[in-house]
Structures are given as C-alpha cells and as structure tokens.
Amino acid sequence: MDFLSGAESSLIGLFVSSFVSATLLPGSSEVVLFAVLKLYPDQVFAAVALATVGNTLGGMTTFWMARALPQKTLQKISPRHLGWVRRWGSASLVMAWAPIIGDALCVAAGWLHLRWLPCALWMMLGKGVRYGVIAAGTLAW
C-alpha cells in the first residue's frame, strides 16, 4: 500500500537533500532538483519552493550553531568572510547559496549575532533565485 506518489516521494527527497546540502555536510541538491524536474516537470513550483525552504533551513541551522560558538573562536572564522558580513550585514547572506563561501557567510553571520529574520530572508532570496535559474535551465534543456 503506497502512501506517497512518485512525485511526492521525489519532492520529499529533494527537501531533505536541500537541507543537508546547506549544512556543513556534503550534498548536491542541484542534481536532485534536476532529476526531479526531468521526471516531474509539472512539479516545478513545488520543487523550487521545497528546495528553497529546505536549503534555507539548512543554512539557518549553520547560522544558529555558529551563534552558539564562544567568542574566542574568532581566529577560526575566515577574516575575509567576517569582513563581508560586517560590511554588508544580513544582505551578505544573499550569497549563502554559493559553494564554499556560503557556509562561511552563514557561520560568520551567526557568530556575529546578526538578527535572524533578515538573515533568513536574504538567504532565502539568494537560494530561491539560484533554484529558479536551475529549474528554468532544466526545463529549457
């Protein structure tokens, strides 16, 4: 007895992949999004939304973990990324989608105790645009 359709199962897998990919764990949610959209192109809006929300929640998990770091860990956080976040504030998290630097920006923002809501909104904007571009490219291909 199946409780979920293939599309629903795929979307759940995409959400999980997107979440894990945004934490310090390795992952590639873009590949999963591509596969889901090739199998279920009619699910584009749900797929982009779930990938964006999952990836944002993963980034915010990193943010909250970094917020708990003791102040003496400053030397372990990249001065370059700290500088970006100090200069641009929560808006710097629009780049949280970028490989390698995205995690560092989330860590820096959390460690600097920036307000969480603006951070989450900027992060969601950047991640949503990225997934939207990937979806458009996938459907056009």
Image (cartoon, rainbow, N blue to C red):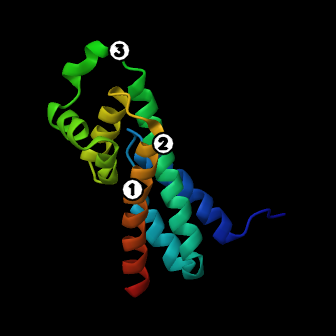
Q: Residue furthest left?
A: 80
Cα distance between the residues tagged 2 and 1: 26 Å
Cα distance between the residues tagged 3 and 2: 22 Å
In percent of width and height, residue 18 lies at 48, 54
Seen in the picture, residue 64 relative to 99 is either above or below; the reply is: above
Seen in the picture, residue 116 relative to 3 is either above or below; the reply is: above
Picture quadrant where residue 26 is located: top left
- Which residue lies under the disc numbered 1? 28
Question: In the picture provided, is 13 more to the left or to the right than 111?
Answer: right
In percent of width and height, residue 35 lies at 48, 71
The N terminus: image quadrant: bottom right
Identity of the amino acid at label 1?
Ser
The C terminus: image quadrant: bottom left
- Residue at 67% across / 70% down in the picture? 6
In percent of width and height, residue 52 lies at 48, 58
Q: Name the element at disc 1.
A: loop
Identity of the amino acid at label 2?
Leu
Q: Name the element at disc 2.
A: helix
Q: Name the element at disc 3.
A: loop
Question: In the picture provided, is 97 more to the left or to the right than 8?
Answer: left
Q: Residue furthest bottom?
A: 140
| Mark number, residue 70 | 3
- Which residue lies under the disc numbered 2? 117
Identify the mark nearer the N-term, 3 or 2: 3
